[in-house]
Amino acid sequence: MAVVEISIVPLGTGSTSMSQYVAACEKELRENSTGLKYELTAMGTIIEGDLDQIISLIRRLHEVPFRLGVARVSTSIKIDDRRDKNSSISQKVKSVQDLL
């Protein structure tokens, strides 16, 4: 199972506010994340599940700002694909919290 963090940034919008774009991406995520767990954070979104499904979903999310009229979009992706044991968003956080 993969854990992926993405950040989609519309460029050249003329505003420092991104909440309308984040909300539109979140709506797309809710409608198309079948079987994937995700968390919206202050700096991006974390998705866990099958990597092929996640990559396909990211492609759809990357298109959202373009549909809203943005001419340039920068998407950052971090992938943690652990195959020696099941890893999840909650397990990664718990591992750190157990050490505190």
Image (cartoon, helix red, strand yellow):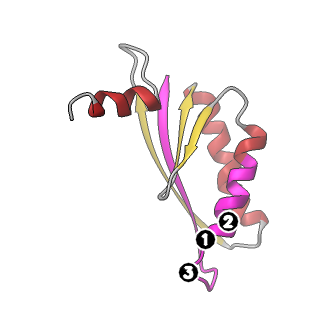
Residue projecting furthest to the bottom: 14
Q: What is the magenta range?
A: 1-28
Image quadrant where residue 20 sits: bottom right
Looking at the image, do the residues carrying marks 2 and 1 touch, with CB atoms under 8 Å apart?
Answer: yes
Name the residue located 72 percent from the left edge and 65 percent from the top edge.
66
Inter-mark Cα distance, 2 to 1 = 5 Å
Residue designated by label 1: 18
Report the residue at 46% width, 32% height from top: 89
- Kindly report the distance in space between the C-alpha atoms of the residues bearing marks 2 and 3: 11 Å
- CB-based contact (under 8 Å), mark 3 and mark 1: yes
Q: What residue is shown with label 2?
A: 21
Which residue is depicted at the point 62% across and 86% down?
14
**Residue on which the image places disc 3:** 16
**Callout 1 crowding tier (Cα within 10 Å): few <14, some 14–19, many ≥20:** few
Q: Residue 40, relative to residue 85: is it above or below?
A: below
Where residue 9 appears, as percent x and y from the top left, is: 56, 65
Amino acid tagged 1: Met
Q: On the picture, is 98 further left or further right than 31?
A: left
